[in-house]
Image: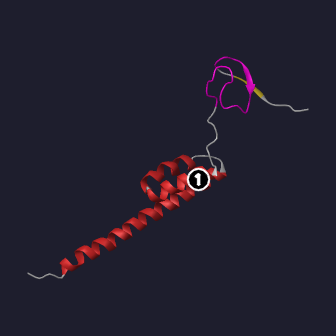
Amino acid sequence: MNITKEILCPSCRVTIPASANFCLQCGVKLKEPPIATSAKKQMVIYFISFLLAPFGLGYVVKYLKQSDPKARKIGITALILTILAIALMMWTSKIFLGSYYGPMNTLRF
């Protein structure tokens, strides 16, 4: 015997399964659907977090707000990749600017 919990839609008062994200009758949003944690979605998030570092922070905030442990791990990983990418960019910029402006510091007038 399979007993499923049901609730009433606050909009149209139709009985629907408690696990539903939307009312099956009127389409009103009952709760937030679970956030995507598929391998494909993770690759996109990690790619953006590392190669387009500041834009990865949007995913960090979105995934860290979730109660799902897997989603939170994705958010933490995206944060680490974003920080690494920014640090690498700063280090590379320092080396480039040092090699470009370094010889100018030795000029004497």
Q: Residue at x 79, y 30 (%)?
A: 5
Image coordinates of residue 23 in percent, x first then y, are 67, 25
What is the residue that sits farthest to the left in this orientation? 109
Left or right? Give the position of 2 relative to 74.
right
Q: Is residue 9 magenta?
A: no
Q: Quadrant of residue 15?
A: top right
First to last magenta residue range = 11-30
Image coordinates of residue 8 in percent, x first then y, are 72, 22
For disc 1, the marked residue is 42
Left or right? Give the position of 102 relative to 94.
left
Q: Is residue 26 magenta?
A: yes
The C terminus: image quadrant: bottom left
What is the residue that sits farthest to the front in this orientation? 40
Q: Residue at x 60, y 51 (%)?
A: 40
Left or right? Give the position of 94 relative to 36.
left
What is the residue that sits farthest to the right in this orientation? 1
**Looking at the image, residue 53 lies above or below residue 6:** below
**Looking at the image, residue 69 lies above or below residue 3:** below
Report the label total.
1
Q: Would you call the spot at circle 1 few (<14 residues within 10 Å), some (14-19), or many (20 or more)?
A: some
Q: Residue at x 18, y 77 (%)?
A: 104
The N terminus: image quadrant: top right
